[in-house]
Every structure is written in C-alpha cells, then in structure tokens.
Amino acid sequence: MLHLFATRRFGPLFVTQFLGAFNDNLYKTAMLFLITYHLLAARPEDAAVMVSLAGGVFILPFVLFSSLAGELADSVDKARVVRLVKLAEIGIMGVGAFALTHDSIALLMLVLFGMGVHSTFFGPIKYAILPQHLGSNELLTGTGLVEGGTYIAILTGQIAGGMLGAHAAWAVVAVAFVGWLTGRQVPTAPPTKAIRVNPNVVASSFRMISHLFEDRRLKLTTLAVSWFWAMGAVLTTQFVPLVKDRLHADEGVATLFLTMFSVGVALGSMTVSKLLKGKVSARYTPAAAVAVSTFTAYVVAAVHFYDTVPGVADVGTFMAHSGSWHVLIALFGMAFSAGIFVVPLYAILQTECDPGERARTIAANNIVNSAFMVAGSVIAAAMIASGLKVLDVILAVGVANLLVLPAALKLRVDRLIPLS
C-alpha cells in the first residue's frame, strides 16, 4: 500500500488532492467559526441557518458545472487540467484571505462558491486518472487511499481552521501555491478518444445523467454515493451549532467533533480495502448502512442525556464529563461505518464504466451527489428555521439513511468483480 506514495504516478496526485481538500476545509471551517462565534454570536438561530446554507453554496457549482468539468477532463490531458485548476485556486484564495479579515458574510460566501467551482473541475480528475496510472490490482487500494486521505485532509483542515479562525487568511494562499507546485508533477494522462465539449451545461448534464442511469448497477451506486455525501454535508455543518448551543462548549470541542468524524471516515475507508482483499464488491455496504443509522441514534441519545455544566466548556472540561465518551464513541462509530459504506461504491463507478467516458461518469455522479447535498443543506436549514433543533435534524438523517438500504442490498447480491 505505502509503496504507491513513492511513485510519480500516484504520489503527486495524492498530495495535490490532499492539499485541495485541506484548503477547502481550512477556509470553510475558519469561515463557519467566524460566523458562529463572532459575526452572528448573538443570533444563534441565524448562525445555524447560515452554516446550513454554506454547505449548499459550496456544492452548488458541482450541480452547475460538473458536466463541463467531466467533458473537459475526457477531452484533454487530465494533468493539464490539474495545473490550470490549481493556478485558479491561488487567485480564489487571495480573495478569501481578504474576506476572512474584513468580516463580510456576503464576500465569505462568494469565495466559498469560488472554491466550489475549483473543486468541481478537480473532482472528475482525481478518480478518473487513477485507472490510467494504477494497475488493476492497485486500484481499490489507490481509491481507498484517496478517499481516506481526503478525510484526513478534511480533518486537518478543520482543525487548522478552528484553531486559526480569521488568522487562516494567508495560510489558504500558501497552501494553494504548494498545491499548484505539486500539481505540476502529476504525469500526463491523455484522453483515450476525442470528444466535443458541449457548452450547454444543462443539456450535457441531463445527457450524462441519463446515460449513467441506463446502467442499473451504476444508477444504484450513484444514488447510494449521493446519499453518503448529502448525509455528510448535513451532519458536518450541524456539529458546530450543536456544540455551541446544545453542549455549551467552545471552538475546541467543535473541532474535536469534526476530528472524530473525519478520522472515523478515513479509517473506515482504508479498512474496507483490506476487508475486500482486492475485489470490488458491495458486500459490506448494507451492514455499514445499518450501522450508520444505529450510531446516529446513539449520537442523539448520548447528546440528549448529556448534562451541561455551568459556563462554556473547553476540551478539558468536556472530556472530564462522564457523558462525553458516549458522544465521541457514537460519533466515531457513525463515521467509521460511513467510510466502509462508500469506498467500494467509488471503485464500482471506476471499473464498470467505459474508460473513454470515465471522467464524464464521475462528473455525472458528482452532479447527482451535489443535487443531493444542496437539497440536504436547504432542507436542514428549513428545519432549523421552522423551529426544530439541531438534534432533530441529526435524528432525521439517521432515520432517512435506512432508505438507502434497498439499493445497498441490490448491490450486495450483484456479482463480485475480481481485480487481479
């Protein structure tokens, strides 16, 4: 597994995507903490709505531009796209540095949208390029490392964002610059056939999704992956207001929650590739889905029975509370199960599509993922605005997660795909 990091065909891409995910979350977390604990600290309901909407703002570009991103990645050298996208990130983060130091919610949101555009065009690359650079017996491992690495990047970005707050301003520019340097080392990955890029993103989006959904297995896989991302988008944006307003704890505890979630998904992502031993299979997907719902209910129960202490709890005070371990164990279990759930699904998408259409398949998947995530963010914001509590939203996610079980069971009984 570790030998892949030393190769040029995997190492530079891994580092580049890691830094991109890190920077997204460094900026996003610094922004959410700034809004929740400072700009809207006196209006917690407005802050909860705003952080819910922030998830939708970041994801909206995936809905709008994923078709264009997929066609571009399939029509030109993918390494060239990497370099252009990472160069654009430097400019976007330059504006982001200004926004973090001038307390403008509108500008903060605009930069978040810009980072969403950046990630939209990079998204099809990181999965579509792997089958071109890795052997068939390396693909599941490489996918697991990318997925696990993404969540480690999310984790470290969230920790850094929570610790630095507005002081993250120029760090985001520096990280973008390093990402551009590593992106220049990604080896060439030319298209397998010439295609025409359609500037009509609406028509091409519908065509890509329709083509993807013609394959029953790819359709079920895409819907399951889309639910995973919608669930993650809703949960991670609710952790900060949950910690501040329900547990009466500070930014350090909010960062701890995000840490446990990210570590759990990363470890689950890397564990499942070991469990499957070189086969692309949804064998563990149904059990993982049930486990996610079970641990989500455990999170809600653990928080419900947590008795807050007077004042604002820091990490030490929170950890000294007897109920804190139930909350953290439940949170980790939910995330670990989610990691086991999603990695085999990405491997199915990579292996079962036409190699010449791989980036467009990933892009179509991203469009559906993004629509689910935007819908989830809007629904969560509406639930909070209607008077429901954050715990109600989290419980609703856990119950709704069981709706993905029929798709998971159908994928479970489908054939195993040997990779070696």
Image: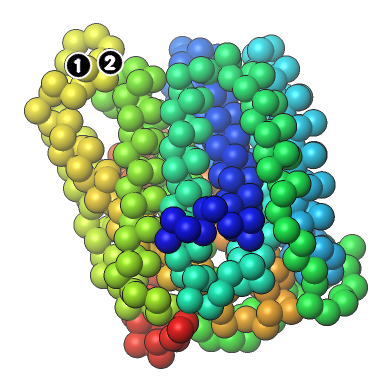
Percent of width and height locating residue 130? 61, 66
Residue on which the image places disc 1: 317
Q: Are marks 1 and 2 in contact (CB under 8 Å)?
A: yes
Q: Residues within 10 Å of mark 2 (few under 14, many from 20)?
A: some
Percent of width and height locating residue 116? 68, 44
Location of the N terminus by quadrant is bottom left
Q: Dot 1: what SS?
A: helix
Q: Residue at x 39, y 43 (%)?
A: 262
Q: How many marks?
A: 2
Using the image, determine if residue 85 lies above or below residue 69: above
Q: Quadrant of residue 27?
A: top right
Q: Residue at x 40, y 87 (%)?
A: 416
Percent of width and height locating residue 192? 79, 78
Color theme of the render: rainbow
Does 374 sit left or right of 77 as displayed?
A: left
Q: Residue at x 61, y 72 (%)?
A: 131
Does 182 sit left or right of 278 as displayed?
A: right
Residue on which the image places disc 2: 314
Kind of residue at disc 2: Asp
Q: Quadrant of residue 352?
A: bottom right
Using the image, determine if residue 171 lies above or below residue 219: above
